[in-house]
Image (cartoon, rainbow, N blue to C red):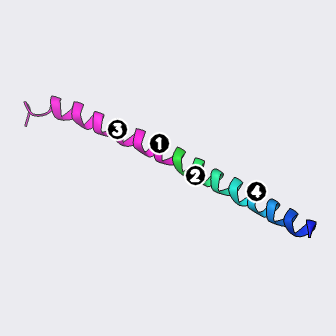
Amino acid sequence: MIRGWTAVIVFTTLAVVMMVGLNVRMWRRMKQVTAAAKAEAERDAIESDQNPRSA
């Protein structure tokens, strides 16, 4: 019976570690994409501020 519970604990721990790892990876990617989008929007805003007089 002890072996069964040990297997359950080990399996659950591995599943939790995998889920945390996946969430951290997705969060970092989402943060990176958000930062890139903000930088691009800021760049577009600067360009649009400079261009209307010439257009």
Residue 3 position by quadrant: bottom right
* Residue at numbered disc 2: 23
Q: Quickly name the residue at label 4.
A: 13
Residue at (78, 63) in percent of width and height = 11
Question: As drawn, is 29 to the left or to the right of 4?
Answer: left
State the mark number for residue 38.
3
Q: Which residues are magenta?
A: 29-55
> Mark 3 Cα within 10 Å, few/some/many (few <14, many 20+)?
few
Q: Is residue 17 above or below residue 32?
A: below
| Mark toward the start of the polypeptide (3 vs 2) | 2
Find numbered disc 3 in the image and state the secondary structure of the residue it sits on. helix
Which is more N-terminal, label 4 or label 1? 4
Magenta region, mostly helix, strand or loop? helix
* 3 vs 4, front mark: 4
Question: Mark 1 and mark 4: span between their CA atoms?
Answer: 27 Å
Confirm or deny contact between disc 4 and disc 2 (CB under 8 A): no
Amino acid identity at mark 4: Thr
- 5 or 36, nearer to the observer: 5
Distance from the alpha carbon under mark 4 to that under mark 2: 15 Å
> Is 19 left, or right, of 40 in this rendering?
right
Q: CA distance from mark 3 to mark 4?
A: 37 Å
Tag of residue 19: none
